[in-house]
Image (spheres, coloured by chain):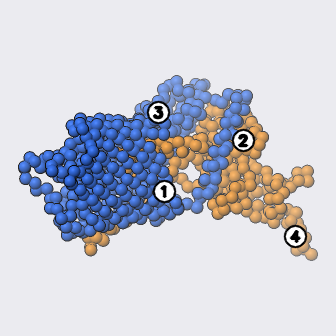
Chain colours: A orange, B blue
Amino acid sequence: MRRLFQLVGCPLLLTAQVSLGDEPKQASAVAAWSLEKGHRSLEINFADLLTPSQKEIIHSGFSTFTLLAISESKFNEKDTPPQVRLACKVKYDTWEERYQMSRIEPAPVMELLTKNYQTWAKECLRYTLVNNGILDKFTKGGTLYAVLQIRQSSPDEGAKIKNWLVRQQSGFMQGLYAHMLGDFQFSGMTKITIQVPAHPADETKKSNLHKK
Amino acid sequence: MKTLPINAYILAKIAILSVQLFFANLTFAQSPAPPQYELEDIEMIGSSRLTVEQLKEQLRVNEHTVMSDEWLTEARARLLGLGIFKDVFFTLKKGSKSGLAKLVIKANDDDTVLSDWAVGGEFGLSLIEPTQALGDSSIFRGYKIGLVGRNFFKQSHRGAMLADVDSRGNLVFGQLAYGLPRFVSEAIQLDMMASAVEPQQRYFETEGYGLRVQSIWTRQRKGFDLSYGLAWYSNRHTRYRLEGWPDLVAGPKLGIIRETRFLSFLPTDGYRAALSIMPSLVRRNEPVIETEIAATKIPLTFLAFTASGRATQTGQTAISVRTEGKVEIPLTTNSHGLRSIFYILNRQGVDHYKNIRHSSNESIIGYRYHSAGFIGDLNFRLVARHPFDGRPSSNYTHSNDPTHLIGDRP
């Protein structure tokens, strides 16, 4: 039995963890209320939240896809679509040092050629929430959730490559891929928690009530 | 695992967006043309699994290669298709003059395999119920060591080795396989394999023949893989032979394969169907036909079920059939994926040739754990019916009688 326990223990000795790929980054942002021409809105700016690797992807010299999804609920708790989507394609010209941008969603498609990072970031990494239905829910403050994904690859590329690997598994070489546990990582993903402050008017009301 | 819904959602969304991006590309045509530069130099950082020369060869690039978005897609597929990187990221830097750019490739090694040779391995311990035919009362019966490499000599050579040793130190099942470097664009590969199995000890790994040597080209054609090459199956060795079976077949082998599963630590949903024929040059009236069918279903996230069957027929009189049903239950995961599984496997086998018939039934309960490039496998085998029970144990103290070298005996 002693021998048995020694041998059973062998697989357990293999439990040393290794550092594998990147996890989605976590970040937080604060939304700001604004009032223009009597219309209230919530400004959310993600431009300063880009990680160094995400900035590197954008400045790679090849086309980059950015996708921003904002929701009232955490995406991983409810499989509900986000309320807001912002999708762009941007290509940085290494020699001319300028951005060629195309915003795909929300419609209509908008194009821009600029040398200023902030200019294109304003279109693709900043969102102004004007939907009254949503805004009403946040007059007393709250939390929104967002996911920002920046990819250098086309969406179906991962599936194509995996299909290629599937077909390399001839009878002789099947064991070669028994170790491939992880999936390909094509993007930099950031999960963002957005703190929404109470609407100033609501704050004023509260303050007045308190004074009385 | 909880992050799946958002990942799935975003991927689905991006797929829809790709259609819109296509139209956006059309609109791009009216604005300044997207910049495209010629390659001046190439550098790889983050990995030493490929030399710059290898990299250039794999990417098929030279000094005049124009690096467009389409080129990027193909280049990435070429590198990831090698199976040694988890991710590759391409960046352009300014070249020495306008119109030229330096390509910097950041690679993230697939660290489920180790070192520049991308090596992984498997250690297995099988506890087998003692039987009369095995002639050993010890419960410890099998130790298995497997090694795989996807990038030998840092030049994309592939190889696999498996040694299954019984408690007396005899090699009861061994396999050596080698694959020439493969490239995405050619969609063709050459694999060579030699295997030896002792039927008395590893009946289910024996499919009619104790020794097999094959050299096969596999070419992708649409959804199918066509295979062709040479094969040699033998029962002439005193240890590695299925007694009473045809002693030798050899000749060209042609086949067709359809595989849709990704055979990772836990296979994905899908199926495999394969058919091959070997018109033997040795026993001309007895061609060898091999068929295989397998399907994996994952009806629930915590359960994978695989059913498979294989048959090897030699001529009209010899047939060897193996079937198995396997249930795999993932036990533990971490942020990088699945770590361990529990499995139950039932195997059935039957061999029939003239007046000789063997059959067996075996159940296996096992646990597999993956970490740091290696898989540990601990299993217990319960043999319900040993194929050679009641017959002398194959301890291979055969005399030098040359008739022993001829398998095809009455």
Residue under pointer 3: B185
Residue type (three-letter) at the residue carrying disc 1: Lys
- The disc label shown at residue A60, or none: none
Give the alpha-carbon distance from disc 3 to disc 1, as whole Å.
Answer: 31 Å
Mark 3–mark 4 distance (CA, rounded to whole Å) = 70 Å
Nearest the eye: A177 or B272: B272
Quarter holding the C terminus of chain A is bottom right
Query: Which callout, 3 or 4, points to the residue nearer the camera?
Result: 3
Real-space CA distance between mark 4 and mark 2, rounded to the nearest whole angstrom = 43 Å
Residue B171 vs residue A87, the one in the foreground: B171
Q: Crowdedness of circle 1 by 10 Å Cα count: few (<14), some, many (20+)?
A: some
Rounded to the nearest angstrom, the CA distance separating label 2 from label 3 is: 32 Å
Say what secondary structure mark 1 lies in: strand
Q: Is residue B263 left or right of residue B152?
A: right
**B233 vs B350: above or below:** above
On screen, residue B3 above or below B20: below
Give the numbered dot on residue B297.
Answer: 1
Q: CA distance from mark 1 to mark 4?
A: 62 Å
Q: Is residue A66 above or below residue A71?
A: above
Q: Which residue is mark 2?
A: A104
User: Given the image, what chain letter belongs to the residue carrying mark 4?
Assistant: A
